[in-house]
Amino acid sequence: MNLITSRDNPLVKELRRLSQDSTAYRKTGRVWLEGDHLCRALLKRGLVPEQAIFAQSALENATTQLTQAAPRNTVLPDALFSEISGLESASKMGFVWTIPSSTETHSTSSIQQGVPTVFLDRIQDAGNVGSILRSASAFGFKQVLARKGTAALWSPKVLRAAMGAHFGLHLVEGVEPEQLADLRIGWLSTSSHQGLFLHALGAKNPLPNPCGWIFGHEGQGVSHEVAQLASTTVQIAQPGGEESLNVASAAAICMHASATVGQA
């Protein structure tokens, strides 16, 4: 165990940046996974953290699974751990993990073809993005692509909202609409006011397999240039009469439908 007590220690400074700067990971290639749930989600996927960080008061009760997960363990005084924490109530432990080269988030050359994919068209709320990643993982989508203007996929807020879904997905940022045409999948675009009703799709209009879903900006929806790439535009019936659904809720409904019914 390595004990650090100085606020000016290089590791402490890096942890502070990773926990509080939404795009710091793009420079370092590393992320800060704070909390028992995220850390266990990483280990469940068979992935190994670079370093484990514990608050002094948490170390005594930490499980062997967590204390032996990383090649290096560091202990911080509780007050110092609270300073680096991105949470209102610090969780008192976390992992530093290096994003592997196979999931380079800003290398569009790593886009995979022929796999179920989600394209995020400028979705700005980190909570929405994280929820969509979680649904994508749950419903068997392998890849999530994000256009510039979408919330940073590996930001602390998105990581917390996705609750570990990142570790089972291939994520790529900075993807331009024209790159979607060559992925050998059928694209579906979503709309709050036009298109075929999702529940009515059947033999005449089956959901493609593999399927690609396009989800758009919270206020503006899917942009025109992206919507043109889709073979079908889909809307969700709302018999209760609301104007629209939250994009994360709509995405979950759409991905569930394509994962369970109506595939060609």
Image (cartoon, rainbow, N blue to C red):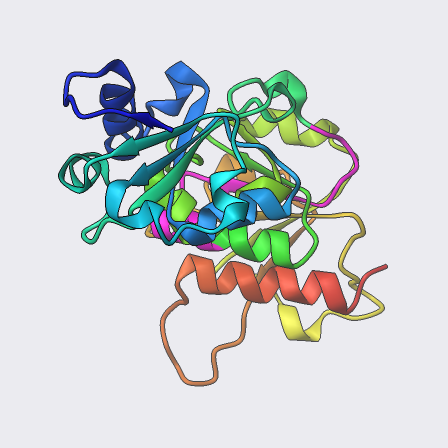
- Quick one: quadrant of the C terminus? bottom right
Of residue 184 and residue 70, the one placed in the foreground of this image is 70
- Residue 128 lies, with reference to residue 250, above or below; the image says above
Q: Residue at x 72, y 61 (%)?
A: 259
Q: How many marks?
A: 0
Of residue 110 and residue 6, the one placed in the foreground of this image is 6
Quarter residue 108 falls in: top right
Q: Residue at x 65, y 65 (%)?
A: 256
Give the percent coordinates (x, y) of residue 3: 28, 26
Q: Residue at x 78, y 48 (%)?
A: 210
Magenta extent: 112-131
Q: Residue at x 69, y 30 (%)?
A: 181
Residue 191 appears in view = yes
* Most distant residue in the bottom direction: 240
Give the percent coordinates (x, y) of residue 117: 66, 43
Of residue 114 and residue 234, the one placed in the foreground of this image is 114
Q: Is residue 87 left or right of residue 46?
A: left
